[in-house]
Image: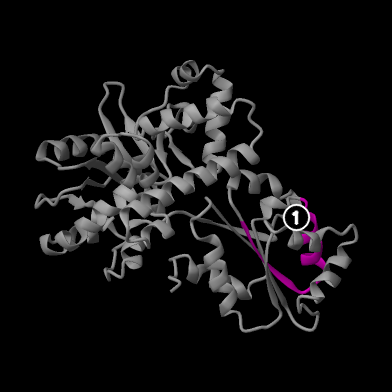
Amino acid sequence: MLIKRKIFSTLKKQIDLPEIVVLTGMRRVGKTTIYQMVYDTIPSGNKVFFDLENPIEQMIFEEKDYNNIWENLKSYGITSTERAYIFLDEIQEKPEIIKAIKYLYDHYNVKFFLTGSSSFYLKNLFPESLAGRKVIFELYPLDFEEFCFFKKVKIKFKKIFSSKLAKKNPVQFEKLTKLYDEYVTYGGFPQVVLTEDYEHKARQISDIFKSYFQKDIIQLADFRNINAFRDLMLLLFQRVGSKLDVTKLASAIGVSRETVYSYLSYLCGTYFINLISPYSTNVDREVSGARKVYICDTGIVNQFAKVSEGALFENSVFLNLRKYGKINYYQKRSGAEIDFILADKNITLEVKCSGTERDYKKLQKLSQQLKCKEQYIISRKYSKMENVIPAVYI
């Protein structure tokens, strides 16, 4: 049975709007499945779904005269009598198709739904001429809320942090904590979540990583030293939640700092890592500051590296926080630090496996200096302490 992701309702609303819809994200996060569900909800029969990894289906668009593409589509049941809906999966496999899409969009009554496996390629694929014609959505592995839904556990997650705090109770926490253990250990890729056998989960995670490395790095990227790239990835696993020293990384893998920066940019652009900057009211200082790294999925980290329980937990919290907007961290010159700041919401967050009064007082003091109104400790264990929110509610 197909399970709807939270983004499904948003994509469904796009059906009647004119813009080209682009859904991007890592491989195996469920882009194709969601589009198939959207496709099935369209009542019109004037629709078609193509997989551009299939060379036969690529040929449909290999026409110098783009009007001939429309003629080709007629053999798939597409007509000009009503609006047509064309779904194109994995457009990075056929980058030259973008010009044809623009032409067909401008000259025919057609709605396009596109998927691509990375923002890195999509940002370079789409010319400025598509400005105003497209809307882009990003899809990630499941957050814990969706994880629970996939596990058929009914729980309403509050969006406001003060409401999350008010909702916590030890009985419900005990019901959720085992699920959270599984979520942290095996991550949120849908096919992994839906697999019950733990050995099979591990094999699937390994296959997901191999697929990413083979298709997004070896086949699509233009890096001469693949071994150095691989070594950097392994080093990043060990540095989850830590600030990156690019000079040390460059020395460790034997490449220039500029090469490391290009590798990091690629890993970010293909959704494999997330880099967050230090919080500052000075934009230049924020951009130039050392960034902290988090990996796309805790299951991948757990499979390929030995990291501390605290680091893995912090990574899982980050993955669940990004739906709330921009995330920064904060560190004073003295070394005092706040794990996460949601500046747009005026909230500071400290991640602890088990928070203490001392932890909260420290957070409160730093938050007051930053003039942040709300501050909470996100804990792995249940705590009766005020201002401590168990991670199962994030």
Q: Estimate the x, y position of residue 113 in percent, counting from the top left.
A: 64, 65
Q: Estimate the x, y position of residue 59 in percent, counting from the top left.
A: 80, 60
In screen coordinates, is 53 left or right of 346?
right
Residue at the image position 54 percent from the left and 26 percent from the top = 227
Up-down relation of residue 338 to residue 47 (above or below): above
Kindly indicate the quadrant of the structure image that contains residue 132: bottom right
**Residue stretch rendered in magenta on the structure:** 96-115
Residue at the image position 17 percent from the left and 50 percent from the top = 387
Residue at the image position 34 percent from the left and 50 percent from the top = 186
Asked if the magenta segment contains residue 329, the reply would be no
In screen coordinates, is 50 left or right of 147?
right
In this view, the residue in front, 261 or 309, is 309
Query: Please, what is the three-letter code of the amino acid marked with disc 1?
Result: Ile
Secondary structure beneath disc 1? Answer: helix
In this view, the residue in front, 125 or 358, is 125
Kindly indicate the quadrant of the structure image that contains residue 2: bottom left
Residue 178 shows up from this direction: yes
Q: Estimate the x, y position of residue 213 in percent, counting from the top left.
A: 54, 40
| Furthest-right residue in this view | 65
Kindly indicate the quadrant of the structure image that contains residue 354: top left
Q: What residue sits right under mark 1 in the picture?
A: 98
Q: Estimate the x, y position of residue 103 in percent, counting from the top left.
A: 81, 62
The N terminus, quarter of image: bottom left
In screen coordinates, is 131 left or right of 155?
right
What is the crowding at mark 1: few (fewer than 14 residues within 10 Å), some, or many (at least 20)? Answer: some
Residue at the image position 60 percent from the left and 44 percent from the top = 215
Q: Please tell me how many numbered marks the rendered image carries.
A: 1
The C terminus, quarter of image: bottom left
